[in-house]
Image (tube, coloured by chain):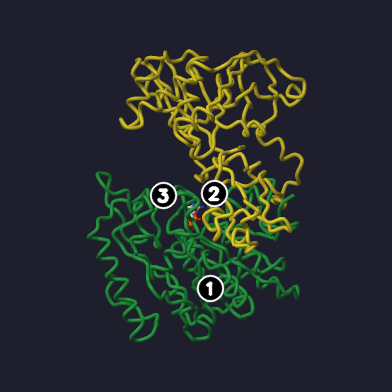
């Protein structure tokens, strides 16, 4: 049996990717399972999906804890220890990243990376990296051939979206890179840890303490950046009160926005009465 | 670092981009200040309140079971009294937790007259678990349990009017508010804190993901709801009922519905019907004054 775990954020389409591969495998006469881990359904929240493939009927109904492959739709999720937890020796780690990501694993694996972010932004104008990640993953894993993968994508999406998604998978298929990743000493020390090992650092009561970045550096969720024109700004503070995240503040120089946490919702730009804020390209 | 030195709502929390509820939570907590204890049941803001081991609110928060916000407020009031502690007790709950499963506890706590500020942020559905219908979902909306089309019907029933239900208890202070009118919202929260006894705020909370609109439009949509006459801003202060705002020239209600994918199936006939209903309501208000009268039929 082959087991795959997909880590993403709500809205990135991880489950869809698992289902597309499962459909391709079913057509091939194999048995397959694709299902999400149910939890909060908020956009941006970390979510997992699982995929199992076998020649024999699959009776397991549990989450995948010892994956042959881990697909990471959002590189910021590598900050969480449980993302690579349990990956098998010689397994495959596929990450949405422009360069080879830095990640500590306790066993030697193959690591693959592809700029699914860039591919998705250029084709869809927003972050839906799933079909690009699918292309990269199928190529390096070899579970599904390119033609079967493209057929499965076309069958999944309505006609008007199909070709763009096939194109995303194709670009990733062509551009994915692979390297060997050795087991690291720090991760070696953490071997045998459970996903909840960090609880050891806290008293055994269900208490959480105020801290920023509970959901990580949420600035990475942005698909557009707020760009402030200080010349135009009349310092009315409308953007400050309208920002859900509370990351816009009025200073002597006008308005500043904490980009580490700004999720890029765009409310400040829309609410500004003098159009001193606009939504620009990320990182421009 | 570009922001408040000690924010009461921590940035980098797990709310969606453009979330109306977390904006309301920020406006409310900032209006009340640090001397408060919040009670949050299972709902989106319950999930946002903690990403263990980090907490989002910089004030004490008790997270309760889905139905028991008002029961916790009752117990906390007793405990604060016993300790001689002066602190504002704030219930912060979604519409499901308020108008559906938590209604009995809320009704009991208001009737017993405990002192608390109960905020219902109304995103018109069970959003945390994937956009199921609630008693507060408006008629005609598509939700995951009223999917419409070949899969079943859209929501056929009109929404429960929680503010009228609460008003019927003879509550000392009740108000509706909107994140698009932060000064009005802040003033009402401050008034609720000052009033002795139970107080209730019903606040419209746009949900980009559940309603299906771009995250940038959250506040604008909340404003359109008021400007079209759909969401009325008012308060009931010790029996005196006042509209906080009567839109002079009302926007067409279509401007509120059309940008949301949950209403994508509405035809122009339905828009005309909805427009007529709102127009009639406001004509009555202009003629006879604003009242919380209950219609006899659930049309
Ligand atoms: C007794 C019980 N039933 C169901 C649930 C699952 N649950 C958690 S949050 C939620 C929806 C909450 O809806 P609402 O109160 O409207 O708040 P929102 O999520 O929309 O913010 C449900 C059904 C639960 N926690 N407890």
Q: What residue is shown with label 1? A: B200
Q: In the rendered view, would you say A109 is above or below B294?
A: above
Q: In which quarter of the image is the C terminus of chain A?
A: top right
Q: Label for residue B286?
A: none
Looking at marks 3 and 1 on the same chain, the residue that comes earlier in the sequence is marked by: 1
Q: Nearer the viewer, mark 3 or mark 2?
A: 2
Q: What element carries label 2?
A: loop
Q: Which of marks 3 and 1 is in front?
A: 3
Q: What residue is shown with label 3? A: B212
Instruction: Chain letter for yellow, please.
Output: A
The quarter of the picture where residue A80 lies is top right
| Residue B34 placement, left or right of A219 | right
Which residue is most to the left?
Answer: B269
**CB at mark 2 closer than 8 A to ligand 1?**
no
Q: In the rendered view, would you say A200 is above or below A275?
A: above
Out of B224 and B193, give the one closest to the viewer.
B224
Chain B hue? green
| Image spot of residue A75 (x, y percent) | 61, 30
Q: What residue is shown with label 2? A: A265
The answer for how far apart the CA atoms under marks 3 and 2 are is 14 Å
The quarter of the picture where residue B297 lies is bottom left
| Residue A31 placement, left or right of A251 | left
| Image spot of residue B270 (x, y percent) | 25, 60
Q: In the rendered view, would you say B108 is above or below A72?
A: below
The answer to whether dots 3 and 2 both sit on one chain is no
User: Do the CB atoms of the residues marked 3 and 1 lie less than 8 Å apart?
Assistant: no
- The residue at the point 53 percent across, 68 percent down is B181
Q: In the rendered view, would you say A142 is above or below A3?
A: above
């Amino acid at each position: 049996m082959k087991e795959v775990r997909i880590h993403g954020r709500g809205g990135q389409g991880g489950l869809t990717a698992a289902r597309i591969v499962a459909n391709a495998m079913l057509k091939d006469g194999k048995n397959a399972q694709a299902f999400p881990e149910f939890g909060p359904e908020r956009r941006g929240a970390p979510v997992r999906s699982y995929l199992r493939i076998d020649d024999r009927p699959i009776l397991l109904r549990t989450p995948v804890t010892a994956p042959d492959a881990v697909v990471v739709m959002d590189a910021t999720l590598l900050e969480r220890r449980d993302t690579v937890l349990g990956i098998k020796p010689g397994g495959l780690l596929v990450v949405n990243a422009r360069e080879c990501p830095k990640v500590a694993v306790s066993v030697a694996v193959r690591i693959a990376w592809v700029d699914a972010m860039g591919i998705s932004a250029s084709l869809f104008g927003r972050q839906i990296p799933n079909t690009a990640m699918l292309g990269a993953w199928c190529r390096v894993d070899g579970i599904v051939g390119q033609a079967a993968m493209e057929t499965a994508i076309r069958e999944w999406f309505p006609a008007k979206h199909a070709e763009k998604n096939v194109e995303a998978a194709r670009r990733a298929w062509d551009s994915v890179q692979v390297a060997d990743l050795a087991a690291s000493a720090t991760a070696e020390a953490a071997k045998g840890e459970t996903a909840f090992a960090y609880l050891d650092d806290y008293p055994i009561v269900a208490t959480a303490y105020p801290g920023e970045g509970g959901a990580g550096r949420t600035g990475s969720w942005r698909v557009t950046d707020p760009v402030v024109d200080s010349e135009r700004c009349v310092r009315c503070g409308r953007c400050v009160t309208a920002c859900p995240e509370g990351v816009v503040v009025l200073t002597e120089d006008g308005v500043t926005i904490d980009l580490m946490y700004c999720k890029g919702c765009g409310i400040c730009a829309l609410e500004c009465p003098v159009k001193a804020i606009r939504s620009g390209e990320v990182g421009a | 670092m570009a922001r408040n030195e000690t924010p009461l709502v921590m940035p980098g929390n797990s709310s969606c981009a453009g979330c109306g509820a977390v904006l309301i939570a920020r406006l409310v907590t900032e209006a009340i200040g640090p001397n408060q204890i919040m009670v949050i049941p299972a709902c989106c803001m319950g999930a946002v309140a903690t990403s263990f081991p980090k907490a989002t609110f910089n004030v004490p928060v008790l997270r309760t079971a889905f139905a028991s916000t008002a029961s916790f407020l009752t117990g906390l009031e007793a405990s604060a009294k016993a300790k001689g502690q002066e602190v504002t007790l704030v219930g912060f709950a979604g519409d499901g937790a308020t108008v559906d499963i938590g209604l009995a506890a809320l009704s009991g706590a208001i009737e017993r007259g405990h002192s608390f500020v109960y905020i219902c942020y109304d995103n018109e559905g069970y959003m945390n678990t994937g956009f199921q219908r609630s008693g507060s979902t408006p008629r005609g909306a598509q939700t995951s349990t009223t999917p419409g089309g070949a899969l079943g019907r859209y929501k056929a029933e009109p929404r429960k009017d929680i503010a009228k239900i609460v008003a019927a208890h003879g509550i000392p202070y009740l108000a509706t508010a909107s994140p698009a009118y932060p000064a009005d919202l802040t003033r009402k929260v401050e008034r609720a804190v000052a009033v002795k006894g139970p107080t209730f705020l019903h606040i419209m909370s746009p949900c980009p993901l559940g309603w299906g609109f771009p995250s940038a439009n959250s506040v604008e949509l909340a404003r359109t709801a008021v400007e079209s006459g759909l969401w009325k801003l008012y308060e009931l202060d010790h029996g005196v009922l006042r509209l906080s705002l009567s839109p002079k020239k009302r926007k067409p209600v279509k401007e509120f519905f059309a940008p949301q994918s949950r209403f994508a199936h509405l035809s122009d006939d339905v828009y005309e019907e909805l427009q007529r209903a709102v127009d009639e309501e406001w004509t009555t208000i202009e003629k006879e004054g604003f009242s919380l009268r209950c219609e006899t039929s659930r049309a």
